[in-house]
Amino acid sequence: MADKKARITVDGIDQTIELPVLTGTAGQDVIDVRTLGSHGVFTYDPGFMSTGSCESAITYIDGEAGVLLHRGYKIADLAENSDYLETCYLLLYGELPSSEQKAEFVETVKNHTMVSESMQKFLDGFRNDAHPMAIMVGLVGALSAFYQDHMDINDPKHREIAAFRLISKMPTLAAMCYKYSKGQPTMYPRNDLSYAENFLHMMFATPCEDYKVNPVFAKAMDRIFILHADHEQNASTSTVRLAGSSGANPFACIAAGFVTLWGPAHGGANEAVLTMLEEIGDESKIDEFIAKAKDKNDPFRLMGFGHRVYKNFDPRAKVMRETCDQVLAELGQSDDPMLKIAKRLEKIALEDPYFVERKLYPNVDFYSGIIMKAIGIPTSMFTVIFAMARTVGWISHWNEMISGSYKIGRPRQLYVGHTERDYPTKK
């Protein structure tokens, strides 16, 4: 809707510029600035703090109220009542599936979990000590070389097949990276297991003996996948959309998402939490590090607390906290020194006026890192798992954009360099 108007007066422009104000189904109104260029001016918004880059019906966040909705459903309800593949269906198609639709969807995903054997040869070209995200960027981009049969982005069926392939094969590729770093043989996917069970089996099983997936761990992984499935127009999702706006194939676009998520300010936060806990080292040093965190002249920061979007409690963190307790109870690791540090930090953050007034509550990264460490997943794989879960969000946004009307992304700039100058004459 564009019933309201915004009016801007700029020095040097004789007329008042009138712009439509758009109203969505939820959230703030948006001033449509697309015609500003015809008046000789542009907006300037580094970091896109106040700029809507697209129209979307997938995910809604109210950071002030601590609300996260996928297609209108609260994240806590999905984590409690749904599973990852049902959430994938919801994000892709807009509605929860019927029992028949879900069964068909799950069966299709399971039937696409294998990757070309040539991918193993490609994997063998990397150093064993390479960061798993470096390998995943290459493997995901290379999928476009192995699956060229359905690459017409203007064909809805081709886009759907690409989505299935990405969701299905991502756990296989992630587990291959881990096994390669360990010098262990790749474990093939098993279609008799659930999505989370299959991933854990490919991660930790070996050909030497039977491996039974712990159901508590499988449930925890499934929740981690759900809670990371999508998060609106963050840096990686915006990157996938921008790459897609050029007409690039979906595998290349998702690889671009991996590249962006790799940044420590985005997907590396849960890895940073474990690094911080190791730096603190002992429960007796917590007060010392809390004082450092409060000192504005000290560069030390408490990782896993607060959020760029949420100015209240991260709704995903509440679910993760419950899951964290379940995993630790299953392992009997309540006395683990690092986990005791984490629990004490959590208590301080929820009670200390300094953190409460600044709303520096524990976020989803704080708890997910602890859970994955407890399960036995190395910190180097944390961001890979985040990206694996986020793949469905990326491909859903990409498909939404390609399905509608879009233009290639082309941001403008505020130029502050030299104006035109003459090349010096040689003497």
Image: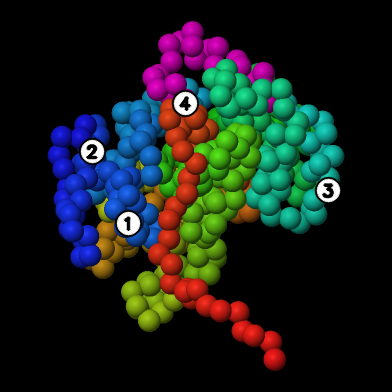
Q: Earlier in the sequence, mark 2 or mark 1?
A: 2
Q: Secondary structure at mark 3?
A: loop
Please tell me whether the stretch drawn in magenta is mainly helix, strand or loop: helix
Badge 3 or badge 4: first in the primary sequence = 3
Q: Is residue 334 visible?
A: no
* Placement of the N terminus among the 4 image quadrants: top left
Upstream in sequence: badge 1 or badge 4: 1
Q: Which residues are magenta?
A: 90-113
Q: Is residue 281 magenta?
A: no
The amino acid type, in three-letter code, at marker 4 is Ser
Q: Are marks 1 and 4 in contact (CB under 8 Å)?
A: no
Q: Which residue is mark 2?
A: 22
The residue under label 1 is 40
Residue 103 colored in magenta in the image? yes
The answer to whether the residue labelled 2 contacts the one labelled 4, judged by CB atoms less than 8 Å apart, is no
The residue located at (83%, 45%) in the rendering is 124
Residue 272: x, y in percent? 52, 60
In this rendering, the label closer to the viewer, 1 or 3: 1
Q: Nearer the viewer, mark 1 or mark 4?
A: 1
Q: CA distance from mark 1 to mark 3?
A: 52 Å
Q: Is residue 324 left or right of residue 2?
A: right
**Residue drawn at (41%, 79%) of the image:** 298
Residue at x 18% of width, y 58% of height:
14
Label 4: few (<14), some (14–19) or many (≥20) C-alpha neighbours in 10 Å: some
Q: Tell me residue 230's x, y (percent).
A: 44, 38
Q: What is the number of the mark on residue 403? A: 4
- For disc 2, the neighbor class at 10 Å (few under 14, some 14 to 19, many from 20) is some
